[in-house]
Amino acid sequence: MKLVVLGSGTSVPHPQRAAAGFWLETETGSLLLDCGADTAHRMAAENLDWPNLDAIWISHLHLDHCGGLAPFLFGTKHAPLTQTRRKPLTILGCQGISKLLRAIDDANDYDLCDQPFPVELREISTDNSPEADFEILPDLRARSFSTRHTNESLAIRLTDRAGASVVYSSDTAYDESLAAFARGVDLLILECSFWRNKPTAKHLELAEAMRLAPLAEPRKVILTHLYPEWDAIDLESKAKELWPGETIAAYDGLRLEIQNRTWVQKRER
Ligand SMILES: [Zn+2]
Ligand SMILES: [Zn+2]
């Protein structure tokens, strides 16, 4: 598997951090984890094969996570590069995605799911049942977990055939059952919106993220969803003071690749 961070930021406009978006590639396909407002153009900027993207996961309805979905579909509907595509695109994620796309369709007869290729859209419930396991790409199993952020918010755990795994928390409040969900994962992509004195209960600050890490015991953590207050702070060394494990501060363009069950940082392209 390969991971490219497209957006390590939030809804707040920032010169270096786009809104949430992560490109994940396996031997059998490509998957976008969240599609923030900037994601479509970020995929192009990173030279990724967006015209052949296989699946999109939407964690929740905040626009820094799904605001780019309709613009991306508007793009693929008309882009010369996608006119000959015939393989389907799967859109999976939280409750309410269809309603959102319908509302945008209604505003201008976009018909966003009527593409040159088939689109399959499926909403995942928030009941956290362990048997609610699904295949998001061939040979890539997924399980979702309802997070304490908004009613529809979901984290996702992905495992490939070789057993390599990733958890993407998306936005969440402090919740130790999320650590249980992420237990033993190879790579935990965890939100860490604030350093300290967080202004809302619905996000994490560093001390909380670093309390979840030893409970989850991931092999590596990427902290993301970074508000501009992080600009002045050395996140990785602050994290090290609280948890000795390996923490990487996300940045747009960060690339990792799995080698023998270990996620290794790659040089930028
Ligand atoms: Zn967010
Ligand atoms: Zn949110």
Image (spheres, helix red, strand yellow):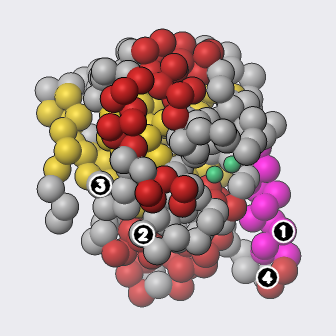
For marks 4 and 2, give the CA distance. 34 Å
Q: Nearer the viewer, mark 4 or mark 3?
A: 3
Q: Give the mark, 4 or 3, whose residue is nearer the N terminus.
A: 4
In which quadrant will I find the C terminus? Answer: bottom left
Residue found 66% across the figure and 39% down from its top: 197
Image side of residue 84 versus residue 208, left or right: left
Q: Label 4 belongs to which residue? A: 109
Q: Which of marks 2 and 3 is in front?
A: 2
- Residue type marked 2: Gln
> Which one is in front, 220 or 243?
243
Q: Give the mark, 1 or 4, whose residue is nearer the N terminus.
A: 1
Q: Does the magenta stretch include residue 103?
A: yes
Query: Main SS of the magenta segment?
Result: helix
Asked if the residues shown at circle 3 and circle 1 are in contact, with their CB atoms under 8 angstroms apart, the answer is no
Q: Where is residue 36 in the image (x, y as percent from the top left)?
A: 57, 62
Q: Which mark is residue 16?
A: 2
Helix, strand or loop for disc 4: loop
